[in-house]
Image: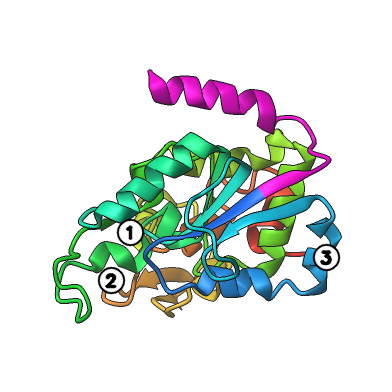
Amino acid sequence: MVRWWRRLSRAKTKSTPRSSCDVAYVQLAGCCGCLVSLTDTYERLLDILDSIELVYCQTLMDEREIPECDVAVVEGAVCLNDEHMLEEVEELEEHADTIVALGACASTGNFMRLSRGNQQAAPTHEAFVPLTEVADVDYAVPGCPPAPEAIKRFLTLLLEGKEELLEPFAKLAEGKTEYCGCDLMYHVVNKSMCMGCGTCAAACPTRAIEIVDGRPVVNENRCIKCGACFTQCPRTIWPGDEAIKELIMGGE
């Protein structure tokens, strides 16, 4: 009931254009690659900085607690054995009107799903799940990391309140969280929907997909469950129209 009320109250604020927006950037368990991708937007990010006030970021400022904010952009998976991290997730839900899971670790789990103990620094940390499984996330942006262009376009549409173009990212945040090569084979290839375009192979960051006789073949040992192949395939539900397709593909 509490989560339902939070989502209802968020819906009243996120569907209209924002003249200004307080943004908190939160880093959980991950490699910080999404933050690097965000900074790689360079001059493209300048187009929207006039509408954004960064109020929290562990890397850039000395803030100990997440303040009240319009949007919380979160990268990294959640360690279920880390009490402090779980408290941080609770702060997110209490203080942010809109929560965005940025990157595959936060949205689908990515390779963090494979982390089960044996970490040199913290061997007790053995259970990692995406943010979408433990928090009421509004949008999830896949990618390992998401393209700088995709981040900029997503933030632009979010600030403009264009909900219809962000619907695929809302579906990723509230539904099934594991999108990997196996999903591509089951939902596309095995249903004779694949047209052999090679987009999945080109999108895969670990080169786990090879096109053989016009069809993708997935190397399960290399697949990190980042969701890039499934979300960028033109035969899935994601590219509903050209605007959404361009956003997902990171095009200009």
Residue at image location 45% in from the left, 75% down from the top:
213
Residue at image location 66% in from the left, 23% down from the top:
12
Camera-side residue of 62 and 50: 62
Q: Can residue 198 be seen in this view?
A: no
Mark number displayed over residue 71: none
Task: Residue 81: give x, y in percent of width and height.
Answer: 20, 56
Magenta-colored stretch includes residue 21:
yes
Q: Which type of secondary structure does the marked residue at label 1 adopt?
A: helix
Task: Residue 110: give x, y in percent of width and height.
Answer: 37, 63
Amino acid type at mark 1: Cys
How far separated are the C-alphas under marks 1 and 2? Answer: 8 Å
Q: The magenta stretch spans which residues?
A: 1-22
Crowd class of label 1 (few under 14; some 14 to 19; many from 20; radius 10 Å): some
Going from the N terminus, do you reach mark 3 or mark 2 first?
3
Question: Which residue carries the number 3 mark?
Answer: 46
**Front tag of 3 and 1:** 3
Going from the N terminus, do you reach mark 3 or mark 1 first?
3
Question: Which residue carries the number 2 mark?
Answer: 220
Mark number displayed over residue 182: 1
Q: Mark 3 and 2 residues: CB-CB less than 8 Å, in contact? A: no
Task: Residue 187: give x, y in percent of width and height.
Answer: 40, 49
Q: Mark 1 and 2 residues: CB-CB less than 8 Å, in contact? A: yes
Camera-side residue of 169 and 71: 71
How far separated are the C-alphas under marks 3 and 1? Answer: 39 Å
